[in-house]
Image (spheres, rainbow, N blue to C red):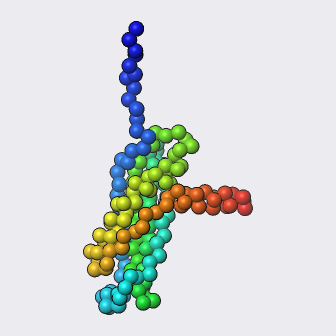
């Protein structure tokens, strides 16, 4: 007897439907004078925040919100804010959806965020800053710990 072949097509577990800049701003409040004061690497503070929301069709929007504040010689050099989004489809077990939304999808989005920021700073007359890789697992664990702390206090 011949083996029966399965004619089922396996749906991908995660698919990025689109990626986009949802919002972006660059401020160089002391330009052009501040350009003369750049003598070395600026002091840079990076803040990363991830948001997600479901769509009606079962897809999700994931936003990787990045804010970078930089100073040189104690003066504000620039502020850049980028909200980079992705619409994603997920075909995963329910317990895997949240980690995918807060770890795997941001990990896939991050190289684009890094490139957009470096290119935008360069186009603004500033030296480009290449963001170091982000540990999205640690960010997720920190978020979960904060949620547990908040629910325990309530």
Name of the residue lying farthest toward the top: 1
The residue located at (42%, 67%) in the rendering is: 132
- Number of numbered callouts drawn: 0
Name of the residue lying farthest toward the right: 153
Residue 82: where, in percent of width, then height?
40, 67
Residue 77: where, in percent of width, then height?
39, 83
Residue 67: where, in percent of width, then height?
44, 71
Residue 105: where, in percent of width, then height?
44, 52
The residue located at (34%, 58%) in the rendering is: 20
In the depicted structure, whether residue 34 falls above or below residue 81: below
The residue located at (43%, 56%) in the rendering is: 107
Q: Quadrant of the C terminus?
A: bottom right
Question: Can residue 124 be seen in this snapshot?
Answer: yes
In the depicted structure, whether residue 76 falls above or below residue 85: below
In the depicted structure, whether residue 35 falls above or below residue 89: below
Q: Nearer the viewer, residue 44 or 91?
A: 44
Residue 6, quarter of the rendered image = top left
On the rendered structure, is 90 left or right of 96?
Answer: left
Q: Quadrant of the N terminus?
A: top left
The residue located at (36%, 47%) in the rendering is: 17
Q: Nearer the viewer, residue 94 or 41?
A: 41
Question: Can residue 23 be seen in this snapshot?
Answer: no
Residue 89, quarter of the rendered image = top left
């Amino acid at each position: 007897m011949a083996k029966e072949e399965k004619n089922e097509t396996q749906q991908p577990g995660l698919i990025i439907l689109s990626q986009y800049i949802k919002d972006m701003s660059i401020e160089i409040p002391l330009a052009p004078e501040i350009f003369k004061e750049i003598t070395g690497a600026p002091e840079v503070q990076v803040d990363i925040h991830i948001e997600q929301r479901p769509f009606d069709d079962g897809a999700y929007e994931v936003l990787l919100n990045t804010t970078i504040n930089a100073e040189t010689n104690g003066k504000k050099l620039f502020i850049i804010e980028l909200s980079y989004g992705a619409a994603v489809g997920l075909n995963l077990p329910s317990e895997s959806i949240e980690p995918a939304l807060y770890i795997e999808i941001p990990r896939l989005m991050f190289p684009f965020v890094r490139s957009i920021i470096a290119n935008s700073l360069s186009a603004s007359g500033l030296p480009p800053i290449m963001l170091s890789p982000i540990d999205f697992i640690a960010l997720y664990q920190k978020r979960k710990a904060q949620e547990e702390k908040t629910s325990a206090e309530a």
